[in-house]
Amino acid sequence: MFASLQTIETRSASRSSPVVWFPRVVSPAQTQPARRADSHMLETLEPGASTLCVEKDREIYSQGDPAEFCYRILSGTVRTVKLMEDGRRQVAEFLLPGDFLGLDALDEHDLAAEAVTATVLRRYARRTVEALADHDPTVARRLRGLAGTKLRVAREQMMLLGRKTAVERIASFLSDMTARMPHGPDGRIALAMGRADIADHLGLTIETVCRTLACLRRDGVIEMAREAVAIRDARSLHALACDPRH
Amino acid sequence: MFASLQTIETRSASRSSPVVWFPRVVSPAQTQPARRADSHMLETLEPGASTLCVEKDREIYSQGDPAEFCYRILSGTVRTVKLMEDGRRQVAEFLLPGDFLGLDALDEHDLAAEAVTATVLRRYARRTVEALADHDPTVARRLRGLAGTKLRVAREQMMLLGRKTAVERIASFLSDMTARMPHGPDGRIALAMGRADIADHLGLTIETVCRTLACLRRDGVIEMAREAVAIRDARSLHALACDPRH
DNA sequence: CGAACTATTGAACTAGGTCAAACCCAGTGG
DNA sequence: CCACTGGGTTTGACCTAGTTCAATAGTTCG
């Protein structure tokens, strides 16, 4: 729909060693095996749901909007953003196909949601979700579980922003994205977001992101060409990320 | 129980201008007016609950502990802490009387909880809370609301850690604490936590915390003596904090 | 091809960190 | 009552990781 499915090569990558592309549009099942609770919940919510296509860089909802709807990403990538008056920006999270969006808001969205790439969403009324949760304890539990997961991720991010160095932040980010995104046997992923988004997610500047990526490439930890990143040395990367996963 | 209730003065503060103390032990009602949903929930949970006294700097639970219990703070101050292998520390949040603790965990606590001061807690089995939520949609909603609030706070903290300067971080912290703690008409509060805890909460070093506080004092924004802080110029403080509250 | 982006790289600068030395109590014991 | 000790705090001097500013280089699209 938005991208061709055949693999492609970049010119610069083929210079040194070919980096084969993976398509950016994937079915939810590929990335996030829907849990039983979700499929039941989603089926029940289906009547009244509607599909929404959002262009690249368009807003899905704004900071402060009444939280009338929530969404599930079918394809594309979304960022949730907090803005300060003087323009400083913090990207709280990147959301991928299968992820929920705006489900944990109170009465207002405290973050804006923007499409990083052209995105297709399934939209549900939050009133309906709340009503369903009132009737069905399983759904309510699942919602609590989702909130707990978000909280855990947010706390990990606080550690990153408060205490990690630039290299550690980049390594953590790549490690995290590699774990969440579809990738080939060599660990190749296609980062949908630009350097500015990455910088605002990691509390760095664009320049530091570039330099640090270049540094990791020089050290042979990753291969890289624009948005394409291939993990060469996962062990080193996880070590740099201070990632207890490995 | 842990502190006398009469107001006290510090010597150093009385040098320049007297800073009258507010007792650190307060009834929950003073700080956090318990919501209707909470009182109902707490009453129902009462059978099976138990009270727990924790000494200063003792752990309430560890990172990775199975999340068997959750707690409500009756008196004292608690910090939730994330630790890295090399000792770097991030204090995720400070919790005050009336606040809940460990309620939003998944199967394991992803943060350790430690008593900043001697603390009294009421302990509830999470199984019981979960069961109550299954039966009572109001409770389930309240739990979602609590998680939503935690998430909102965490996101505000991400903005602080990712994008704010040292002065802005300190100002935000003081502004936040002043809003949450009991304080006199002049905005005087007694910070229960040491500089190290503040530093690890704000992603700074002890030295920077000290220097920045000294700076705010020099500028007449705050009065300060050890743990005592009095907001002199709330308008300036909120402006420095980039706090849209004012 | 040229305009407009985005990414990359280099050089100079600075906010905040590091190291080290006072300082300031609170508690202890002579 | 006072010296001593040990913890947290404060302050100063210096240093560095990361920012800022500026110039270059790909890339995309008309």
Image: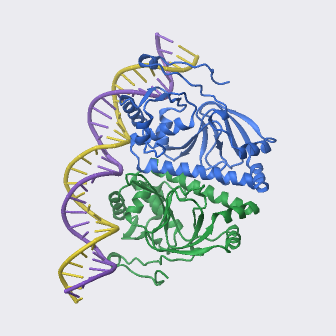
Chain colours: A blue, B green, C purple, D yellow
The answer to whether A225 is drawn above or below residue A49 in the figure is above
* Image-based side of B14 in relation to B83, left or right: left
The reply to whether residue B191 is in sight is no
Q: Where does the image place residue A205, in percent across and percent down from the top left?
A: 42, 38
Number of marks present in the image shown: 0
Q: What residue do we see at 39% from left, 35% from top?
A: A212
Which image quarter: residue A168?
top left
Q: Where does the image place residue D11, in percent across and percent down from the top left?
A: 26, 62
Quarter of the rendering occupied by the N terminus of chain A: top right
The answer to whether B109 is drawn above or below residue A240 in the figure is below
Which image quarter: residue A34?
top right
Q: Where does the image place residue B13, in percent across and percent down from the top left?
A: 35, 76
Given residues A230 and B147, the one toward you in this image is A230
Q: What residue do we see at 58% from left, 34% from top?
A: A116
The answer to whether A48 is drawn above or below residue B74 in the figure is above
* Image-based side of B110 in relation to B171, left or right: right
Which image quarter: residue B145?
bottom right
Given residues B22 and B41, the one toward you in this image is B41
Q: What residue do we see at 47% from left, 33% from top?
A: A195
Q: Where does the image place residue A139, in percent across and percent down from the top left?
A: 73, 51
Q: What residue do we see at 70% from left, 67% from top?
A: B37
The reply to whether residue A165 is in sight is yes
